[in-house]
Image (cartoon, rainbow, N blue to C red):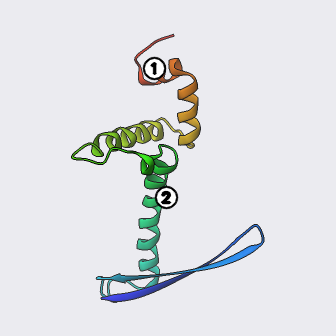
Amino acid sequence: MQACRLERTTRCKGRTTVKIQYVISSLPRKRADAASLLGHWRGHWSIENRLHWVRDISFGEDKCQVKKGHGPQNPAAFRNAATSLLRLAGCKEIAVARRDFCYRPRKLFQFLGIMKL
């Protein structure tokens, strides 16, 4: 078991911010040195940034009022499917594509193969 500390210094609009995070890992030191632990940590945050951030910012998941039973799982499944379809189609900006489809439903139907030109 190991404990790690990650210190990040960021600058935004001329302001410097230092953030410190700690983690406890069950990996022994023989199997995970500092560099590999950092890789695992970055891998975790890449998932957070790539999926959860998109679900919350682009699809407003945290604002969803559905809270009972299996209700929250259904819209989450649609959000995941939409994100996956857009990424498989090579879309880099999920929010831009979502807005474009909202304003042009025919384009969405063509994308989904429901309607042809």
Do the residues bearing badges 1 and 2 touch, measured as CB atoms within 8 Å?
no
Closer-to-camera residue (3/75):
75
Whether residue 10 sits left or right of residue 4 in the image: it is: right
**Corner quadrant of residue 23:** bottom left
Q: Name the residue under label 2.
A: 49
Q: What residue type is labelled 2?
A: Asn
Q: How far across and down, in percent of the image, does residue 2 sit?
A: 35, 89
Q: Describe the element under mark 2 as helix, strand or loop.
A: helix
Q: Mark 1 points at which residue?
A: 109
Look at the image and tell me in which quarter the N terminus lies: bottom left
Whether residue 39 sits left or right of residue 93 in the image: it is: left
Of all residues, the one furthest to the left in this rendering is: 69
Q: Describe the element under mark 1 as helix, strand or loop.
A: helix
Q: How crowded is mark 1: few (under 14 residues within 10 Å), some or many (20 or more)?
A: few
Of all residues, the one furthest to the top in this rendering is: 117
Q: Which amino acid does label 1 sit on?
A: Phe
Q: How far across and down, in percent of the image, does residue 93 sit?
A: 57, 43
Whether residue 104 sits left or right of residue 89 in the image: it is: right
Of all residues, the one furthest to the right in this rendering is: 14
Q: In this view, does 72 lie above or below 8?
A: above
Q: Is residue 5 above or below residue 105?
A: below
Q: Residues within 10 Å of mark 2 (few under 14, many from 20)?
A: few
Q: How far across and down, in percent of the image, does residue 115 sit?
A: 44, 13
Q: Residue at x 43, y 41 (%)?
A: 83
State how far apart marks 1 and 2 are (Cα).
28 Å
Whether residue 41 sits left or right of residue 98 in the image: it is: left
